Structure formats: structure tokens, C-alpha cells
Image (cartoon, rainbow, N blue to C red):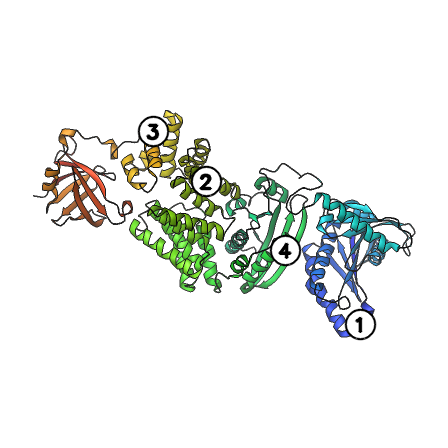
Amino acid sequence: MERHLAAILIADVVGYSRLSRIDEEDTRIRFHTDLSEIFEPQIAEHHGRLVKTMGDGLLVEFHSVVDALRCAVGVQREKARRNADASREQRFEFRIGINLGDVIVEGDDIHGDGVNIAARLEALAEPGGIAISGSAYDQLRTKLAVGFVSLGEQKVKNIPEPVRVYRVVLDPAAAGKTVAAPRTRGTGLAAAVAAAVAAILAGAVLWWQPWTLVWPEPPPRRIAYPLPDKPSVAVLPFINVSGDQTQDHLARGLTDDLITELSKVSGLFVIARHSVLAMRSSEATAQDVASELGVHYVLEGSLQRADSRLRINVKLIDAMTGHSLWAERYDRQYRDLFAVQDDVIGKITSALEVKLSQSEQDRLSRIPTDNLEAYDNYLRAEQEGLIYSDVNTYRRTLSFYQKAIDLDPRFADAHAGIARVAVDVWRNDYNFLWSAAVARKIAYDAAGEALKIDPNNARAHTVLALLQLVDGRDTEALDSAHRAVAAQPSDAEAYGNLALILAHTGSHQEAIAEMQRALRLDPSPPPSFQLLAGIVFYTARDNDRAIPLIEAARDALPDAEPAREYLAAAYARRGDAARAAAEVGKLKALFPEANFTYYSYLYDYWGKEDLAYHLAGLKAAGVPEWPFGFAGAAPDRLSEADLAGLIDDKTWIGKHKNGTEFLQAFDTAGNTAYRTANTSITGMAEIRGDQLCEKIGGYFLDRMVCGYVYRNTTGEQTDKDYIHVTPQALKFFSLER
């Protein structure tokens, strides 16, 4: 005869006989519906085994009594939700008893005192309630977010020794509390229990107030950041349990979408995706994650896809106690993915008692696309775009976004994705994809299309704000940046973008405050965001914060020119000449033409004081005035009259300092055409004093850029008569004869 220790759960329908007399067939249907829709999913999620059903009840075995109670709590909470609108007479309720004890195994069946005690406990439970034995309580009392009422020792049928009995209090306000049922004369056990529950909840009022986060026991470990004054959540990366790595992007996409959607709720504080992705490979517990990221709640889950079927398990954990507030298993068709997301969002906001405004409800109810193939391509683009590293990554990202748009032209998020890539290409002059002029137009058009489809698209507003800033439309840029934050109140990217615009429009202290908020939302930001944060702090004259962030970005992205540029200036401002010079050396290796005249044109949309501050820092660091450190002799500089003879229907033939051969033609109307083996561009040219100025479409934001022409007395490229120095190039040339 086999024996072992087990956690036993027995459930029974309250008033089954009465309900059967009313409608026997309907009662059986309701029992089996609850069995398949509520009990069986909960039993499977908590690793139980349904031993058998017994008329109007069921017997379940668990290896863990914690799992047994979690299952019971999940069942009763779901039943309470389903019964909320039913009359008292029509409610279909269960009593549940749980015991931890010895059982006898015979085939698939179990019996013995361990099972008998669970049956007696079930009879002592209230309708919709749970009763547990003292042996179970001893293992459970601090492990779940429930309270307990001790009924003391109870004499139960066919069990020789009295059994300690506890009723479970499901109200979250009672979590962690155990009280004894008061001895009341003439009122009975039910009244005594009711009085005990009231005592728990009354006492709880003294310490439990929503979102003040004052708990009866201190958090399990030090929290890295002060907890926000609203419910704070980290959505951990969903685990793909399909055994098929090609579905990894779907698990990551579900994670990202939940973060994005929750970020639209002003009543929540939601950690950015990069910071939670940093925890992906860790074996950290929910408490570890909460401690590291400074949140109260952690959402975790898994995803499994098999052809058109999708199974998703989700759990919301109170990391201060380790207890599960809510858990759900979804077994749906893949086409129901957005419905599952909506349900998860609704359950989380409900569990955390967050009220949604009408505009938030409208935003959350919007389905991004009804074409799941388009959505799949969008998810792939988002994963490619986590860290833009090279031209091939950009191209793959754009390809996936474009496929999504081809499948659904009204997919706003995909248009916004293209806008984000285009503005990045434009700002960083990545002309291996598009010229600056083309990238700028694509960014404007794509952001505009996204906002036509979805006026609350935060990413599109962010892109538009950057474009408006560089175009010198500061008021519009600030308005767009604020719209992005309003559309997605927990979006670190939106706050970081707002901080950048505030920094470059002279509001330095506000910029610092907004960037601090962004970094709180994304405490482990990606290198590109670290660089952005560093630039904001540097511009706001806070080098103590700026330098560590830019150093981290430089170390992660060693070929990022802006990191070298800003670090050189920041080191120089701090008086660290050696480090400043080292960064200038690295900058010249990446960008040999580096010079502060170039930066004066590139950043001329900044405020005058900020631009002067940065240029002085670059000069102090050793960045030269002109490309390759060229400094022409004043007697060799051509005058206004001399310049006219060089561009009036003339053609230059020459070679760049870097060896590139070129030809440049000028007509009498001020038009110019420039050509190399790989480039052909046109623009305008004019003389301003002793400077030759040119405007080439797409370069320096279509602004007129000026330089000088010198007679070539350097001894370099002696077959060329002149030197043309501009912020972009150093060219040696002669007139075509």
C-alpha cells in the first residue's frame, strides 16, 4: 500500500439539491461549465491533478499546499466575478476545503484521513469561501496575499482528534493578518467569523491606503528607487515556451505591446522595455526585479503558439509580499491576440483599482491593425530597431515596416516606425540610406500619415517635435513633445525627447527634471538613450550627470561620433585636458574633417548661448576651426573681386584632401553643380564679402554655408592653384583651361 504526503483540495457546490429541483439539467451544465472553464485551467496552472469528480464536487491533489491555495483563491475570485450580476438565488457557488496530510494511493484514486479532513473542512467553509487545516496554515500563513480567521480546534465527524481550522479572507486589505474568531454568546460561528473579518479589515484601514505603499512588513530587500505615488509596474519579457525560436519575436512583441498600452494609462507608472529586457536572462525573482527597477508590481507570463492556436499565461505579482494578485490562462485563436491584450490590460487596471479617463479608454480600445501578417512584420521591425547598429539593421527594419504598411496602409504604428528611422538617418547624416533632404521629407510624411490615422500616436508626435525643433519652430516643437507625453504618460522616449527640446530652447532646469523622469521610467536605458540623456545634462550645464552617461554610451557604441564630440567638450569644460585630447583624437579617426565651424552650422537652431558654450568647449578640447586643422595665411586669401573671377561661368577640377577627385561648375546665374565618381549634386552659390557661400539641397538643413578660397602656397598638391576650405571639406583645385 502506497502512502505519501499531499495537499488535498475538495470543492462542493453550495445548495446543489435546491438548484437541481429548480432545473436539474441546467444545474449539471453549470457545474461542468465551471469545471472546464474555471477549475481545470486553475488546476493545470498550479500543477494539480484532478483525481475525480463526485456528483456535485471534485477532489484534487497537489504536491504543494501553496499551489493548492493559489488554485482555490483563483477559483473563488473568478466565481465571485461571474456571480457579481446574479441574484442570490441564482448564484452558483462553491465551498472549498484544503488539508495537508497523509493519503493512501490506490491506482489513480486517493483516500484516507488526509482526504476525509479536507472534506470536513469544505463543510466548514462559507459559500464562496475556503477553509484550511492547521497543518496547511502552518505552511501558508506568510506566502499569499490573503488573511486568515482562526476557528480554533474543531471536532469533526469520523476524525478522532480535533482539527485546527482557519477560514481564508480574500480581501487584499487583510493580507498577512491572522485573527481569532471572537467568542460571542448566542450568535453562532458565522457571526463570530464575520466579527473577526471585520476586525481584520478595520485594523487594516490603519495601515493600508491605496498606493501609499505602507505595508505591515518592510519590503524583502532594499528598493533601488523611491516608489512612485501611483501603482508601479514592470512587465517582464514573456517566455516563449513553444519550443520554436521563430516565435520569440511574438513573445517579445506581446511584452512590448503590453508595456506600450499600459504606458497610456496616466494612473500607472510603467518601466520602459529596455530596462525589463535587461532582466530577461536573469534568474531573478519578482522581488529582485522590483528591487532593481523600483516598482511595486511585476507582470510575468509565457506564450505558446501552435499553428493558429495561442496559449498565454499571465500573472500579476505584488512584489512587496510575493503574492499573486491576479492570474489568468488564455487558450485562444491567434486572431484573438488583441482581445487577450485588452483583457489583460483591463484585469491589471481593475486589480490595481486604476480609473481610466474616457480618452484613455478610447486609446486602449483602438486596435492597431486587423491584419495579423502586418502586425507580425511590425513586431519584427520593432525587434530589429531595439539598437540601430549598422546600415543592414536599418534596411531590415525599414523592410519590415514597409511590408506591414503594404499589408495594411492604415497601420499608424508602422508609419510612425518609418518616421522614427528617417529622422534618425536625417539627424545623424547617415546618407548611405538616403540623402538628408530625402530622409527629412520621409520623416515628415510618415509622421504626418501616422497622425492622420491616429492623432494620439506618441512616436509620431515625438518625431514631429524633433523636425520642428531643427526647423526653428520652437513653440510647435514643444507643443508636439507635450502631446507625445500626454498620449503616453509612462513613455521614457517621449519624456527624453521633451527634455532635449527644453534644453535646446533654454529651459535648462525643466529639461533636467524631465530627463530625470525619463531615466526613472527607464533606469537601465539603451546606449542611444544614455547618449541623449548625457547631451541634455551637458547642455543644461550639469557635467557631473552628463559625463558618466556619455561615457557609458561611448563604451557601448565606440563608433558613435556624437559620443566622442560631447565627451571631448565636457572633459574640457571640467579641465581634464588629457581626456579631452584623447576623445578629439578618436573623433578625428572617425570623422577626419571634424571642426567646430562644421558644428556651428549643424547646431545653428540652438539658442545662441548654448551654441557658444558648446563651440567653446570643442575649441578648448582641441577641435580645429577648419577641416584637417587647416589655417590659411591672410595674404593668400582671395578677395571679393578675385572670387568673382573664379565662379563666373567657370569649372573647377580638383582633388579633396582625402584624395577624392571632383569637378564643380558654376554658371552666371548663381547655379552650381558638383560631381565625383559617386556623387552628383546641384545647388546655389554666391559671394558674401571675401567668402564663397553655397547652399546644397539636403545639406546643413538647406542653409547657406560659407568658406574661403586661398592661393595654394602650402607645398601640397602643387599642381593645383587654389584651396577651397568649407566646414565640410578641404579641396585643392585649378580652373579648367
- Under circle 3, the secondary element is helix
Where is residue 687? Give x, y as percent. 16, 42
Going 91% across and 54% down the picture, which residue do you hit?
186
Q: Position of residue 137 (x, y in %)?
A: 79, 47
Q: Which residue is disc 1 drawn over?
A: 20
Of tags 2 and 1, the one toward the viewer is 2
- Identify the mark nearer the N-term, 1 or 4: 1
Q: CA distance from mark 2 to mark 1?
A: 68 Å
Q: Amino acid at mark 3?
A: Ala
Q: Which residue is mark 3?
A: 621
Q: CA distance from mark 3 to mark 4?
A: 56 Å
Between circles 2 and 4, the one closer to the viewer is 2
Which sits earlier in the primary sequence, circle 2 or circle 1?
1
Callouts 1 and 4 close, C-beta under 8 Å: no
Distance in Å between CA atoms under marks 1 and 4? 34 Å
Helix, strand or loop at disc 4?
Answer: helix
Indicate the amino acid at tag 4.
Ser
Q: Say which residue label 4 marks.
A: 350
Instruction: From the image, tell me which residue sits under label 2.
Output: 510
Lower sequence index among marks 3 and 2 = 2
Q: Farthest residue toward the left?
A: 737
Left or right relative to 310: residue 147: right
